[in-house]
Amino acid sequence: MAMKTFGLSALLAALLMASSAQAEDVPVQQVNQDVRALVPQAIRDRGYMVAVNTGSYPPYEIIISPTEVEGAAADLAVAMGQIMGVEIRHQTIGGLAPMLAGLDAGRYDMSVGPIGDFPDRRAKIDFIDWVREYVAFAVQKGNPHNIQSLDDVCGLNIAVMAAGSAERVLKKKVGECEAAGKPTTIQSFQDQNGAILAVRSKRADGFFSGQAPLTYFVSQAPNLLDLAATNLPNGFGDIYQGGIAPKDSDLGKAMLMSLDMLVENGTYEQIMKKWGLERNMVEKAGVNLAK
C-alpha cells in the first residue's frame, strides 16, 4: 500500500501533533546485559547504531530533518537503544530499495520501521514485527453513508491511493458492485492530502487506506472526519509491519528481545497510546509474522 506520501501541510500538522505529544514522557529503560551481548561488537564499540527510515509516515515517523525523527517509532527506537546500551542515530533516505541496499552494504544497521512485512522481501532481512495494520475508511463526520465495511461501498464515490494494494482490492469490489447493478466510482490520488481533502470537501464519500495514517489525519480534523470500518479485514489478510534486521542475525534477536521487554513492562502500550495507535498494537512482537 502506498502510505508514505505526505505534503508540506501534512508535515506541518504532524509537527504540531508531535509538539503536544512530547509532553507525555516515556520511561527511561535500563540496559539489559543479555540483550546488549547480542548487539554486534562493532556497534557496541562505537556506541551507536544507525536506524534508517524512508520518510515521513505520521504518526510513526515524523521527519524533522534527515537525522531527526519524532513519532511512535522514534520513541520506540530510543527505548530499544536504552535496553541495548547504545544510542540510536536516524538517517532518512528516499524509498525502500535504497534502504535495503544500504542495509546490505552495511551503511545502516537496522530500521525500526514500521515497514510492510511481505514474504518476498525476506531474502536478506528479517522483519521484527510490532504493528498490526488494517485498511479502513476516513469518512465525513457522523459517517453519513454508513460505511461499516468494504461491502458498503457500492453506489458510493471512494478515494484511494493510486497503484497500491488498497486500490487493487477496491477495484475488485467495485467490479462486484457493478455486476450487481450498483455503479461505484473510484477516485485515485497520488498523495494522502488530496484524498483526505476530497472527503472533507464531500467530493468523495470515503478514503480507503491504511488505518494508522487515517487515524492521524482524522485526529487533525475531528470536527470534520471520522474513522469507519476499523480493525476489519476489508478485503485483506493479516497485515503486519515492523523493524528490519539482517537475516538470522543476533541484532534481530536483540531487537525482538528489547521489544518483548517493552511490551511486558507497558512501555510499548504507553508509546502506542501516546500517538493514538492503540488500534494497531500487537499482543506480542514476532519475526516474519505475515504469511
Image (cartoon, rainbow, N blue to C red):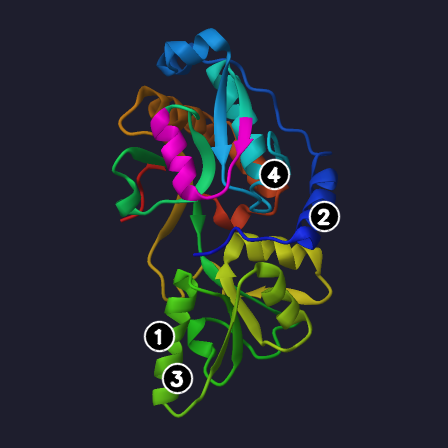
Residue 209 visible in the displayed image: yes
Write down the region rendered in magenta: 90-105
Q: Are marks 3 and 1 in contact (CB under 8 Å)?
A: no
- The residue tagged 2 is 12
Question: Residue 95, relative to residue 150: is it above or below?
Answer: above
The picture places residue 43, in percent across and down from the top left corner, at 43, 13
Q: Crowdedness of circle 1 by 10 Å Cα count: few (<14), some, many (20+)?
A: few
Tell me the amino acid under the disc marked 2. Leu
Tell me the amino acid under the disc marked 3. Cys
Q: How many marks?
A: 4
Question: Residue 191, relative to residue 143: is it above or below?
Answer: above
Q: Which is nearer the N-term, disc 3 or disc 1?
A: 1
Q: Which is nearer the N-term, disc 2 or disc 1?
A: 2
Residue at image coords 38%, 29%: 103
93 on left or right of 176: right
Disc 3 from disc 1: Cα separation: 9 Å
Q: Which mark is residue 197?
A: none
Disc 2 from disc 4: Cα separation: 14 Å
- The residue tagged 3 is 177
The picture places residue 156, in percent across and down from the top left corner, at 52, 82
- The residue tagged 4 is 71
Front of the two marks 2 and 1: 2
Tell me the amino acid under the disc marked 4. Gly
Taking depth in this image into account, of 238 and 273 the one nearest to the observer is: 238
Q: Circle 2 — which element?
A: helix
Disc 3 from disc 4: Cα separation: 39 Å
- The residue tagged 1 is 172
Q: Are marks 2 and 4 in contact (CB under 8 Å)?
A: no
